[in-house]
Image (tube, coloured by chain):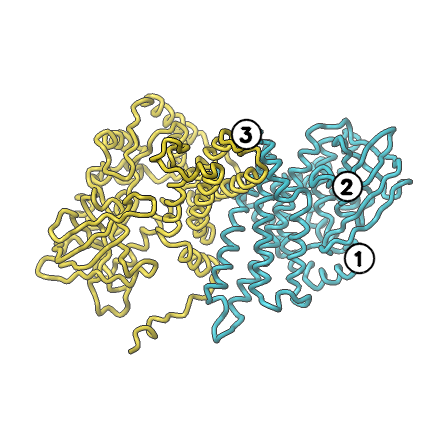
Amino acid sequence: MNLHYSLEHEAFRREVRAFLASHAGQFPKPFGVNRPTAEARAWQARLIEHGYAARTIPSEYGGFGAEPDILKSHVIAEEFSRARAPSGLVNQGISMLVPTLLEHGTEAQKRQWIAPTLRGEIVWCQGYSEPGAGSDLASLKTSAVEDGDDFVINGQKIWTTTAHGADMMFALVRTEPHAPNRYLGISYLIFSMRSPGIEIRPLKTMTGAAEFNEVFLTDLRVPRHQIVGGRGQGWAISNSTLKHERGMLADPHFSAARMNAILELMKTETVDGVRAIDSPVLRQRAMQLQGRVLAMQYHGMRLLSASAKGDEPGLPRLLVKLQTCEINFQLSALAVDVMGEMGLLTADSEEARSHGVWPRRNMFDIGMIIGGGTAQIQKNIIAERGLGMPREPKLANVARAP
Amino acid sequence: MDFSLSGEQRQLQDSLDRALASFSPLARIRCHAETPDAFAGDLWQGLVEFGASGVLVGQSHGGLGLGVLDAALVAEMLGRYVVPAPYLASAVLAPLAISSAGSDAQKDQYLPRIAAGELRIGVGVSERTAGARAGAGVSYRDGGLHGCARFVVDAAGAQRFLVADQDDGLHLVDRGAPGLGIVPLDTLDRTRSTAKLVFDSVAAERLGAPAAGAMRTLADAARVVLAADMLGAAWKMLDQAVEYAKVREQFGRPIGSFQAVKHLCAEMAAELEPGRALLWYAGYALDQQLADASLCCAHAKAYIAEAARFVSRAATEVHGGIGITDELGLHFWFKRIAWAYQAMGSPERLREEAAQLQQLG
């Protein structure tokens, strides 16, 4: 245990701070899950130029081209968070498609897609889940049949974030219906969302917003060269990038910031003239959650150090998504409880505290527990891969029997 | 920046793991548990030879000169093997108190004998850490101790006692001092020796000047070490549950293949394991005297206590009926965790302290 940074990393930290200080007041406004604004794209370009975004992506593909140094990446994240500066773009294209292309794409694919994706000019959406294929993703039915130089795609995708604003989709489709097993029948295709045969319907959730979409694919023609990896390799390829998504969904700094916001809320919110922080019951709940947030923060540092050394701690990494999403839900629930009836008020009410963010977040957090692999699937993974427990016997053959 | 154990620390744990597997098997624990208020001299001697009694004593006084984090790593293994040894009091709290509040003469007099394992000191700080129950509390006046210290740790085999008074003054008392009554307390955990001390104007040796920070350090260290003990005990219970679920068959398949059982095991691991990083940080912060050390020591014990309690009941449940039998012996771990859960501050009390340390409420 040594939590001091090396001289090299301290020098790097000063460099990042100097950059942020010289750009104070020039940070772009948040744009949520929509397309990056021109201002956000300009910021992204400046970050790539200095190596604070797309840091380890080779420069021939539009990245900064630095050697991987996980501690430097951590320093960047810490300093941006401290300065409340928006980090580089985080979206499914950058977090999932780019690593996939780097690992499995052809040279032509890398040159065509990576740089404009990093610059925020091309926005991607993910086409994995289907109405009948959620946790059992490998049962997906959307078919892609070869016809001349194209694949012809028919089927339906669901839970597609930003589909309406996306230029491109990376999708899992079934190209080999007669493969020896269902995993080997899946391929990974990329295609334009402006192609004929695509219909997008917004999917409104319990928060009242349409954070997701349904995407209907009817006789959609995709050139054959837009397959990533070989035919039937899509399952293996997507598995290698799903772990990037789970990492993206579980940032311990996010929970810590929430915790602090709730403690501030508890100092101001009163009932019968007593501050929430002076209620022993609410204070206990807050302190219990603070302990859990701290544990996940230091757990994250433990994983970071392991990664920096090239160690792969199995179980400790597998539990992160399950625990973090649960803690975030408990945090927003506490915030609502601190406000009591006032915690029911939505953003539409002028009486609402903090613009009604907490009840909305609390509902959104349920989606986070489900999305990116449900809590139940996470528990299977922890038990089977982390603890070496036996798998559930396969019932597929039984189900298929007449 | 390196948030991990050093090679030496991993080696310390590995070699202690192997040593305890051979000299502290369950049969030895069971035999000890049948003898009330016994001191397991053979087990203590094994730990002394390992250097455990001197882990926190400086090298100039014949110890290993290591930190609280290292002491916690030792405790994790003692919890894993539910070792009935006076480690918490004699090897952690007493030397820490003497090092931080004792005079040079007291350090020279006591620390080498503590490191050698010859001098064992029971510690009564319950009233200042877990809180004073009705009828308990020690005062110091006219050069003598008065009152009652209720939950004195590692009393069996101790030649002396270290006792905190109500003003956080620390005192050493001879076991045979006139006016001192020693009443063994039978707790459910037979791997821990606990006693009540009654003082009727008992002559005591005060540790140096009353150092304001000494009691704080003792409380912090006690919490880290007890958290580590629970972490070790709980992981052992979880390991046993997982192994059992792999081989025990019902309905024609291993019970571990049922999600009802497997998810319970996953929940145990997912709750417990992040406590390890919090524990490492708390020990490190205490050794480095960082500003948030006390806060993290309190949180580490509160977090691990609750996770370990969950594991101790769920791991027992995974075993089904055999889990609650005396023969299987899983109950020794259950009871070890139950004891440490309350000792030196329950989760609720620790969280109140955590709030106070942050000026909340």
Identify by letter the chain in yellow. Answer: A
Distance of mark 1 from mark 2, alpha carbons? 26 Å
Q: Under tag 1, what secondary structure?
A: loop
Quarter residue B33 falls in: bottom right
The quarter of the picture where the C terminus of chain A appears is bottom left
Q: Position of residue B68 (x, y in %)?
A: 63, 40
**Please, which chain is the residue tagged with disc 3 on?**
A
Q: Position of residue B270 (x, y in %)?
A: 49, 52
Q: What residue sits 47% from the left and 36% below the top?
A: A339
Q: What residue sits 19% from the left and 37% below the top?
A: A121
Instruction: Reply above or below: A302 against A266.
Output: below
Instruction: Reply above or below: A91 against B43.
Output: above
**Please, which chain is the residue tagged with disc 2 on?**
B
The crowding category of the residue bearing disc 2, from other C-alpha atoms within 10 Å (few below 14, some 14 to 19, many at least 20), is few
Of the chain colours in the picture, the one used for chain B is cyan
Image mark for residue B36: 1
Q: What residue sits 27% from the left and 42% below the top?
A: A94
On the same chain, marks 1 and 2? The answer is yes
The crowding category of the residue bearing disc 3, from other C-alpha atoms within 10 Å (few below 14, some 14 to 19, many at least 20), is few
Residue at which label 2 appears? B134
**Please, which chain is the residue tagged with disc 1 on?**
B
Asked if one can make out residue B286 in the rendered structure from this viewpoint, the answer is no
The crowding category of the residue bearing disc 1, from other C-alpha atoms within 10 Å (few below 14, some 14 to 19, many at least 20), is some
Amino acid of disc 3: Gly
Residue at which label 3 appears? A273
Q: What residue sits 45% from the left and 33% below the top?
A: A261
Q: Under tag 3, what secondary structure?
A: loop
Q: Position of residue B284 (x, y in %)?
A: 57, 38
Amino acid of disc 2: Ala
Decide which of B10, A292 is in the foreground and name it: A292
Quarter residue B88 falls in: top right
Mark 1 / mark 2, whichever is N-terminal: 1
